[in-house]
Image: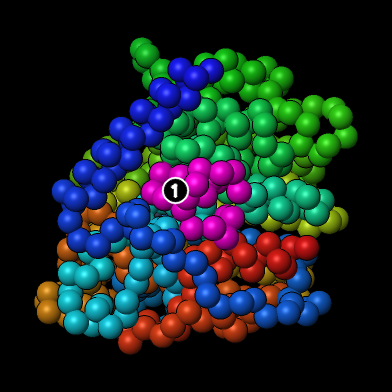
Amino acid sequence: MKKKVWLRGILFVLVAGSALAMLFTSGGPTCAQDAPAVEPIVPLPALQAADRPKNVIVMIADGCGFNHMTAARYYEHGDQPDPLYEAFPVAMAVRTCASGGSYDPAQVAADFDYVAGGATDSAAAATAMATGQKTYAGAIGVDAERQRVENLVEAAEATGRATGVVTSVQFAHATPAGFVAHSEGRSSYAEIAKQMIHESSADVIMGAGHPEYDDAAQAVEGDRDYRYVGGEESWAALRAGTAGGDADADGDPDRWVLVDDLSEFEALTAGDAPDRVLGVPRVHTTLQQRRPGDAGADAYAVPFNEGVPDLATMARGALNVLGNDPDGLFLMIEGGAVDWAAHSNQCGRMIEEQIAFNRAVAAVVEWIEANSNWDETLLIVTADHETGYLTGPGAGEACTAPVCLGQGAMPTVEWHSGSHTNSLVPFFARGAGAEVFEQIPLGTDPLRGAYIDNTDIGRVIKAALQ
Ligand SMILES: [Zn+2]
C-alpha cells in the first residue's frame, strides 16, 4: 500500500514538473500555475418557474471564435445578418481560461499578443461547462484537486431526464467525455470510452472512432485501432448487443443498440427508436475534416467522404431517441473538428465544419419548433475556446475582422496561431432560462461586450434542471 502511494507521489511530481516545464517553454500567461483558481463571482439569481426548462440542449463548436463564425457566415450568406443566430434573444461572450487563469479586457486592447497565451484546452473547458467547476488542462470531469465532480448528464439523469452526447469527432474525445466521464487525463481514450459505454447512464452516444474504417471512410486493411471504442472487447460486446449497464436504475442492464451504417443513422431521425443508441459512423477520427485531398483547398472543393452521416442527421436521430422521455432531455452536440481545421489553419475545412455545425443548430431549432417549444426548452450555442487566432487582414496592432468577398467565396482572413487562444468566444441562448445568463455578466469587453464565465453554463443549467 505504502509503496503504491509513494509511487503515485513520484508520478504526480513528474507529471506536475513536466507540465510546469511545458508552461515555461511555451511562455506567456498560463492557466495552470499555483495561482488560486478563478471562481465565478456573480451569484445566481433566484430562478423562476419559467427559467426551468424541461429540455436542455447545449451545442459547442470546438475552437470557434467570433471570427470563425463571421467567416462561415460570409461564405454561407454573404455580408448579411445570420438568419439562424439572429433569432436568439441572448447573445453574449464567454471567458474560457482554465483554473489559475485570467482574462483582462484592458490588456486585450493594449497588447495584440495577450490572448495568444493563457488558453484552456478542450478537456478543462468541457469540464467547466459540464460541471460548473474550473479545472486544469487535460481534466475530464474532475476538479483542480482531481476530485470527481457531477456532470450535466449525471445531474439530468438524477431528475429522470434522457441524456446524450453527439460529436463529429471521436465520442471519447475531450468535449463529449467531459459531459459523461471522469478521468484525470483526456488521452486515456480507451478507459474513457469504456466508462462511457459500460458505466455511464447516458442514453445516446454518437461520434466517430470506428475501428474498422479510416479517415477516408474506407474499410481498414491490417491493424485496427480500437482505442476510441474502449478496446477490442468492448467493440465485440457492442457488436454482439451485450454492452451497457443499468442506465435507468431498475436493476436490469440496458444494452446499447449499435448503429454504424448511414442508412441506420437516417432511419433513426423519425419514427420508433430504440431506448439506447450508440452511434459510430463508419469513419475513424472525424466525419469529414481529416478526409484525404488538398486540406488547404477552398471549402467544398474536395469531395466529401461518402457513407457517413452529417452532424445535423446525428442531432436529429439523437433528439428522436431522447424525445420519447416524458421527463425531458439533456443533450450536448459538438462540432468537434472546427478546432482541428483551425489548428492547421485550414480556412476551407474550418468553414465546412462551422457550416456543418450551423446546419445541426438549424436541425435542433426545427426539432424544438416541431416537437416542443421555447417555453419548455433551452438551447445554448457556444464554443469552448478560440483556435488559430483568426482575424481579418492587416491584424497585428489590433484585431481586425474577416473581409467578405460575397456568398460562396472564401473570405479574406489571417491566422496568428496554431494553438488555442484565450480570446472570448460567442454565446447564444434561446428559450426557457436563456435570460438568466444576462443577469450574471462577469465583465464587459470593449470588442465583444458583456461576457460570462464558462462555468456559468454548468452552474446555471444544474440549478435550472432541479
Ligand atoms: Zn476545444
- Does residue 131 belong to the magenta stretch? yes
Residue occupied by mark 1: 123
> In this orientation, which residue lies closer to the viewer: 466 or 220?
466
In the image: residue 444, left or right of residue 160: left
Residue sitting nearer the eye, 243 or 246: 246
Left/right placement of residue 251 relative to residue 385 reads right
Identify which residue is drawn at 71% across, 39% down: 201
Q: Nearer the viewer, residue 395 or 100?
A: 100
Q: Name which quarter of the figure residue 219 lies in.
A: top left
Residue range of the region highlighted in magenta in the rendering: 130-149
Residue 407 screen position, x and y as percent: 32, 73
Residue type, label 1: Ala
Give the overall secondary structure of the magenta segment. loop
Residue sitting at the far front? 2
Tell me where residue 185 appears, x and y as whole percent: 44, 37
Percent x, y of residue 236? 60, 16
Residue at 29%, 42% in the rendered image: 19
